[in-house]
Image (cartoon, rainbow, N blue to C red):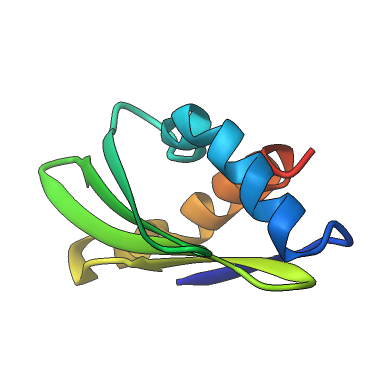
Amino acid sequence: MRLSVPHTLGRAEAVGRIRARQHEIADLVPGFAKVRTEWSGDDRLDLRVEVMGKTIHGAIEVADASVSFDFDIPAALAFAEPMIRAAIEPRAQKLLA
């Protein structure tokens, strides 16, 4: 699942805001999830989400005019993708505010 959030901040400012709010990343995921984060580059934050007995790998990638949220949704949770997308999108925008 890929969700792209446009911004006008520039890459450096967007990365700075995400770094400053990194502790809020767990709030992106609805429900009781355990979220681990690790920067794997200047503009990529890798995510590991453990929820409902499943592990979801993902990443946040920052570009000059957008931030992309990518998650590898397991087949067993594919039915929930629209709900996951609807829950993540407004929270993702708050990370950049």
**Count of number-bearing discs:** 0
Task: Identify the residue at horizontal 10%, vertical 43% (top origin).
Answer: 53
User: Residue at (65%, 45%) from the top-left corner?
Assistant: 16
The answer to whether residue 22 is left or right of residue 8 is left
Task: Tell me if residue 59 comes above or below residue 63 in the rendering.
Answer: above
Most foreground residue, 75 or 93: 93
In this image, 17 relative to 85: left or right? right
Residue, far right: 8
Q: How far across and how far down the image is residue 11, in percent?
A: 72, 64
Residue 46 position, x and y percent, is: 34, 58
Going 50% across and 39% down the picture, which residue do you hit?
28
- In the figure, 2 relative to 58: above or below? below
Name the image quarter holding residue 45. bottom left
Q: Residue at x 22, y 71 (%)?
A: 75
Q: Quadrant of residue 87?
A: top right
Instruction: Please state the horizontal and vertical placement of residue 55, each as a whole percent of the image.
Output: 16, 53
Quadrant, the N terminus: bottom left
Q: Nearer the viewer, residue 51 or 65?
A: 65
Q: Quadrant of the C terminus?
A: top right
Relative to residue 25, is residue 7 depicted above or below?
below
- Tell me: residue 35, above or below residue 58: above
